[in-house]
């Protein structure tokens, strides 16, 4: 048996084995049977090239015929190898496509779950805000009555109460009632902001006068704590178009926090100026207990409390800063906090340039004031 014949037989055996592997490894068995059938048909077509008295050729009479058979066998083998590679690539791409489809489906399911969770959270938030608003209204009416009657008793408008202690009790009732009413008002305002139901009643505001009125509300507390309260107001400030009650509420909250969290003998500085792109920039700085920068985000969450030893004696409702930030942003402004534990806090409030009103736009001339209190 010649070497060429042996090579031809070996290659055709390998070709048939490759076809069988395609049959076994391919999930589409019809394709595998088709490949095996084609391979057998091609081999059968090669048999007339050989002169033999057996089923399978053993000797060749002409070397050219053997070489031709070898060449065709090699061609068949390479064709089957190519088909094997194509099918492997097809299966690989099919697996990738299936994996991508499953991944996409998981992402779609996850997005749907997130949407449903967000919808439920928004519904719960609206329900909570509506509940707080309704409860706040229900509480304000009796509180106003309590405060009013306690003021009448404190002033002894209808005659002596009979004992000096009664007057002290009436004063305590009035003070506690006003404190509780302030909390209720903050809850009501915050719920309105969250529900998008608060409306701005915009008027032209003169910043120096507004700061002077805020100073009158906190100066007694500052004096009791032996704090130095100073205002630095630049003379070229424009008028501000905003809701005066809400802006005043923001400033009083910031000043009250500064007084509350500043040690005896500390300093509080309020600066009002303008800058490119803003109508007004108000900064409230103190050298009080401060807080860690990592706690700033928590301080801006409603009802959140910063837990540390320095603030253990200064508990509050946790509404002042979140409400102030919401009211400033309602005007299109920005609210920023910079703080270091033990070094104090600086809060910066800015209002956008479109809220600036030039004195020339008003009917009456402006009387600029610079306060140093």
Image (cartoon, rainbow, N blue to C red):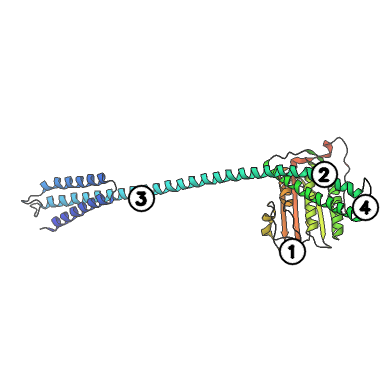
Please give left or right for residue 243 compared with residue 296 in the image.
right
Mark toward the viewer: 1 or 3: 1
Q: Which residue is mark 2?
A: 145
Image quarter hosting the C terminus:
bottom right
Identify the secondary structure beneath mark 2: helix
The residue tagged 4 is 162
Left or right: 9 as drawn, with respect to 142: left
Dot placed on the residue nearer the N-terminal end, 1 or 3: 3
The alpha-carbon separation of the residues under discs 4 and 3 comes to 97 Å
Sequence order check: which comes first, mark 4 or mark 1?
4
Residues at badges 4 and 3 in contact (C-beta under 8 Å)?
Answer: no
Label annotation for residue 310: 1
Residue 53 placed where, x, y %?
5, 51
Point out the frontmost of discs 2 and 4. Answer: 4
| Residue 41 coordinates in the image, percent (x, y) | 17, 45
Distance Cα–Cα, label 2 vs label 4? 22 Å
**Whether residue 349 can be seen here:** yes
- In the displayed structure image, the side of residue 322 where residue 34 appears, left or right: left
Which residue is at a point 94% across and 50% down the rendered structure image?
Answer: 160
């Amino acid at each position: 048996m010649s070497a060429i014949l042996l090579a031809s037989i070996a290659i055709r055996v390998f070709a048939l084995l490759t076809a069988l592997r395609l049959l076994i490894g391919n999930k589409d068995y019809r394709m595998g049977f088709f490949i095996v059938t084609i391979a057998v048909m091609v081999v059968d077509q090669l048999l007339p090239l050989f002169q033999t008295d057996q089923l399978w050729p053993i000797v060749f009479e002409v070397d050219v015929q053997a070489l031709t058979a070898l060449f065709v066998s090699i061609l068949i083998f390479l064709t089957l190898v190519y088909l094997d590679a194509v099918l492997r690539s097809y299966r690989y791409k099919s697996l990738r496509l299936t994996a991508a489809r499953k991944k996409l489906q998981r992402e779609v399911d996850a997005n749907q779950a997130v949407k449903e969770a967000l919808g439920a959270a928004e519904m719960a938030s609206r329900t909570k805000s509506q509940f707080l608003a309704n409860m706040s209204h229900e509480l304000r009416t009796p509180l106003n009555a309590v405060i009013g009657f306690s003021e009448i008793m404190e002033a002894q408008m209808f005659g002596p109460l009979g004992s000096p202690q009664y007057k002290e009790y009436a004063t305590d009732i009035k003070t506690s009632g006003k404190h509780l009413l302030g909390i209720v008002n903050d809850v009501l305002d915050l719920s309105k902001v969250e529900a998008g139901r608060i409306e701005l009643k915009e008027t032209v505001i003169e910043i120096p006068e507004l700061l002077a009125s805020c100073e009158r509300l906190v100066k007694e507390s500052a004096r009791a704590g032996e704090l130095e309260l100073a205002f630095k107001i630049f003379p070229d400030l424009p008028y501000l178009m905003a809701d005066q009650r809400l802006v005043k509420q923001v400033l009083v909250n910031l000043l009250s926090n500064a007084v509350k969290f500043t040690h005896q003998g500390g300093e509080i500085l309020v600066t009002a100026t303008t800058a490119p792109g803003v109508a007004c920039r108000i900064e409230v700085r103190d050298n009080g207990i401060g807080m860690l920068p990592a706690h700033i985000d928590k301080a801006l969450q409603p009802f959140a409390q910063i837990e540390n030893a320095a603030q253990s004696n200064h508990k509050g409702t946790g509404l002042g800063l979140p409400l102030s930030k919401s009211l400033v942003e309602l005007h299109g402004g920005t609210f920023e906090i910079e703080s270091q534990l033990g070094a104090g806090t600086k809060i910066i409030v800015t209002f956008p340039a479109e809220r600036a009103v030039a004195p020339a736009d008003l009917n009456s001339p402006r009387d600029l004031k610079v306060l140093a209190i």
